Amino acid sequence: MCAARDRHPTFKASFAERANNASHPLANYLLRLMELKKSNLCLSADVTNARELLALADRIGPSIVILKTHYDLVAGWDYNPQNGTGARLGAIARKHGFLIFEDRKFGDIGSTVQLQYTAGNARIIDWAHIVNVNMIPGKAAVTALQQAAARWRSRVNYEVRTSVSVGTPVSDSFDGEDDEQGTPAPTSLSAPKEPPPSSSARTDYNNGRKGSIVSITTLTQSFEPVDSPRFSNTIAEGDELVYAGIEEPPWERGLLILAQMSSEGNLMTNEYTQACVEAAREHKDFVMGFISQETLNTDPADTFISMTPGCQLPPEGDEEDGDVAGDGLGQQYNTPAKLVGLCGSDIIIVGRGILKAASPPQEAERYRRRAWKAYLNRIEQHA
Ligand code: 5BU
């Protein structure tokens, strides 16, 4: 089912060793988090309303290192950048120590994917540490997303503070940009749209661009440097807890290239997968790894992380590594022992295997233990 990759150094290396060699700050962080939590489990949180999503993230958080979302299937997703669904998920992620991966599978021309990543109601880049790209449009999509992330990163250390003061209005209209996107002006959670002129002085950024008239009230915004990735003034009290044993994730965003799919009859050929690997090698400072069914590290210098959907365990009590039937809609499943132990995948992505269990937290623990055991067996270490 997968090519033997066991001669590549990453196959037998521990996640701690690989963290030391990881050039991408978020990959380095994730690999250390995996060692700390003894988890290589990603929950595919495919539930259809926001309240359920947040409750699930809080319940399963202790077992996972990544929570994967499809924000567009969640009813009641609150787009408020300060205390909406993305921000609340971020607070839960900090508390339990996991990263958020929006499985958006960008797949359009560069200019469009940049906007889909950073704009619109969802502003995915604000809350998702990791996203993925479908390589059908070609390498430019990767370059474009990297450019957008770099632009966001260069601005995000500045918090926007909004204040309302009485004074002479300077403009009788908004600049229109926010109206087009249907969202309010950026708040402390979003990266400012204009780079601040100086990182030290508090500078009013009015000049007519962000001014509005409410009677004679003027809305002004200023940018202040912040040195922590934690967004302040957000979320309810008590959600400011931070997972012990590791610092908060770095600001750098990461990309996964969708190089292989789990679904039956998918059209991704070996040649296509190889083109994905080449694109990743050309963008090592942004691409953390792949969504794939096996490790794709072949060049001695490759240090990519492979994350694999299409994973289920047979029911408890059945033969440990017996076959698991597909879902009847094209999805095919393999066990953690096969994916991690034989094929060299690093992180298993599990949705319904956990979500449909009588006790999802208990089942998540079962998957965590089995995937971790498969990893330890692969690197020939014992618990
Ligand atoms: P499941 O319930 O464990 O089958 O969910 C798998 C999830 O992973 C689901 O959100 C899919 O959209 C996602 N997925 C997948 O199943 N197979 C793929 O090749 C890719 C994504 Br890419």
Image (cartoon, rainbow, N blue to C red):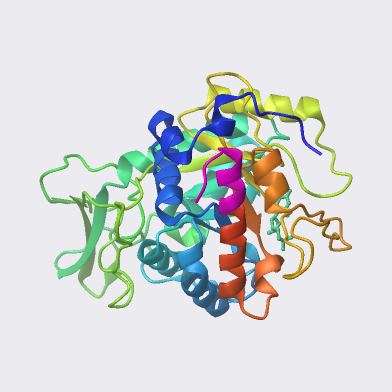
Residue 377 on image: x %, y %: 60, 44
Q: Residue at horizontal 15%, vertical 69%?
A: 165
Q: Nearer the viewer, residue 379 or 68?
A: 379
Locate residue 70 relative to residue 228 in the image: left or right: right
Please tell me whether residue 309 is drawn above or below residue 56 in the rendered image: above
Residue 211 in sight from this viewpoint: yes
Q: Nearer the viewer, residue 238 or 12?
A: 12
**Bounds of the magenta span?**
372-383
Q: Residue at horizontal 16%, vertical 64%?
A: 168
Please tell me whether residue 4 is drawn above or below residue 349 in the rendered image: above
Residue 377 part of the magenta-drawn span:
yes
Q: Nearer the viewer, residue 378 or 31?
A: 378
Please tell me whether residue 19 is drawn above or below residue 298 in the rendered image: below
Residue 261 on image: x %, y %: 76, 44
Q: Residue at horizontal 55%, vertical 45%?
A: 376
Ligand 1 shown in quarter: bottom right
Locate residue 83 relative to residue 145 in the image: left or right: left
- Residue most toward the left? 201
